[in-house]
Image (spheres, rainbow, N blue to C red):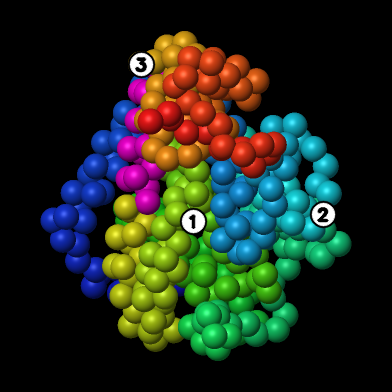
């Protein structure tokens, strides 16, 4: 829409550093097929961890939380959600799996956007997949309780037409104007969030659309590395750049570069992490060796869940076995008991 018009796109200029980032992302994309062929077992483990982390982080960004183990069970064991938070997380899990399995059959459309939103609410009495019926605003709550209106999105009355135009402009950018997908995708997400078409669930839907759109152009890193986790880990920059780039959006006078630079940085970080994880797992061979190497690199106290993130193909029972071996060898000691127990290397 406001970012995806010919007039606006013609005004954009990129620095040598920004172009270098785009080239680097392209180089990583070109190498991804090599990893796909060489390490299928490792990749299956990474994908499972990514779905857990994405389901957890994307919802936590919206204040929706649940115990990590409960989320892992929802994803790995496909357990039934027990409360509202778990219902929302399970909906996100299902939407992620839908994209992972069927992205090539889900070209971007108004109906696909509505479908993804509806899946967020499939375990809730609230019905998803409907445009907002009342105007909304993007606010920021300060520690002292003051509410700051950061942005006023498109009105409820204009939302259906705005979303229709957004999809049309997106298609024109790619099919008629031959624009670079790595430019079009983040601008699509920015415009979507400025329209803010739903009463709730806009951020989560935007992150699902990010994954889907990247799949359409064979940027598959989001299958194995959680982009949502990286967004959460850098959430201050995530929200700050979106805020900067949305100012003046209604008039088409906004500056998209803060958001573009941040978005490309997230994608580049994900690819680097992907290659590092796959290479690390291959180098260390056996599961026991991999767990030991992971612990050797730990700084400060750590939990079993910290090891699981770096050893996605290893069962929790195997991790516990190695931890006991290292404890008996006098290499590590335990702090605390039960589910809150931590481990640390012996000084």
Q: Which residue is mark 2?
A: 83
Left or right of 310 on screen, residue 237: left
Left or right of 108 on screen, residue 83: right
Mark closest to the chain's N terminus, 3 or 1: 1
Residue 82 shows in the view: yes
- Disc 3/disc 1 C-alpha distance (Å): 29 Å
Is residue 323 located in the magenta-colored stretch of the structure? no
* Marker disc for residue 323: none
Give percent across and percent down for residue 213: 49, 49
Quadrant including the N terminus? bottom left
Q: Which residue is mark 3?
A: 283
Quadrant housing residue 278: top left
Q: Which residue is mark 1?
A: 232
Numbered range of the magenta stretch: 266-282
Mark closest to the chain's N terminus, 1 or 2: 2
Q: Secondary structure at mark 1?
A: helix
Residue 122 shows in the view: no
């Amino acid at each position: 829409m406001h970012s995806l018009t010919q007039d606006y796109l013609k005004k954009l200029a990129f620095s040598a550093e920004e172009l270098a980032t785009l080239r680097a992302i392209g180089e990583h994309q070109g190498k991804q097929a090599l990893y796909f062929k060489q390490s299928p077992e490792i990749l299956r483990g990474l994908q499972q961890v990514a779905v857990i982390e994405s389901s957890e982080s994307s919802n936590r960004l919206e204040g929706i939380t649940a115990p990590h183990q409960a989320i892992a069970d929802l994803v790995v064991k496909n357990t039934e959600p027990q409360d509202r938070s778990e219902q929302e997380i399970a909906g996100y899990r299902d939407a992620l799996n839908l994209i992972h399995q069927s992205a090539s059959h889900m070209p971007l459309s108004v109906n696909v956007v509505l479908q993804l939103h509806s899946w967020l609410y499939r375990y809730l009495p609230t019905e998803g997949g409907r445009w907002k019926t009342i105007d909304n605003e993007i606010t920021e709550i300060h520690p002292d309780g003051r509410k700051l209106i950061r942005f006023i999105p498109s009105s409820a009355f204009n939302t259906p037409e705005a979303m229709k135009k957004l999809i049309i402009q997106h298609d024109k950018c790619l099919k008629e104007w031959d624009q670079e997908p790595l430019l079009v995708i983040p601008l699509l997400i920015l415009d979507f969030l400025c329209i803010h078409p739903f009463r709730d669930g806009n951020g989560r839907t935007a992150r699902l659309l990010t994954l889907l759109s990247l799949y359409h152009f064979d940027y598959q890193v989001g299958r194995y590395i959680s982009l949502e986790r990286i967004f959460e880990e850098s959430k201050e920059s995530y929200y700050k750049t979106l805020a900067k780039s949305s100012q003046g959006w209604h008039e088409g006078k906004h500056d998209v570069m803060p958001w573009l630079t941040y978005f490309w940085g997230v994608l580049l970080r994900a690819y680097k992490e992907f290659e590092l994880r796959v290479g690390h797992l291959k180098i260390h061979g056996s599961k026991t060796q991999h767990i030991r190497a992971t612990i050797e690199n730990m700084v400060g106290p750590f939990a079993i869940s910290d090891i699981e993130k770096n050893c996605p193909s290893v069962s929790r029972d195997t991790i516990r076995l190695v931890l006991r071996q290292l404890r008996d060898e006098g290499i590590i000691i335990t702090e605390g008991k039960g589910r809150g127990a931590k481990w640390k290397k012996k000084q």
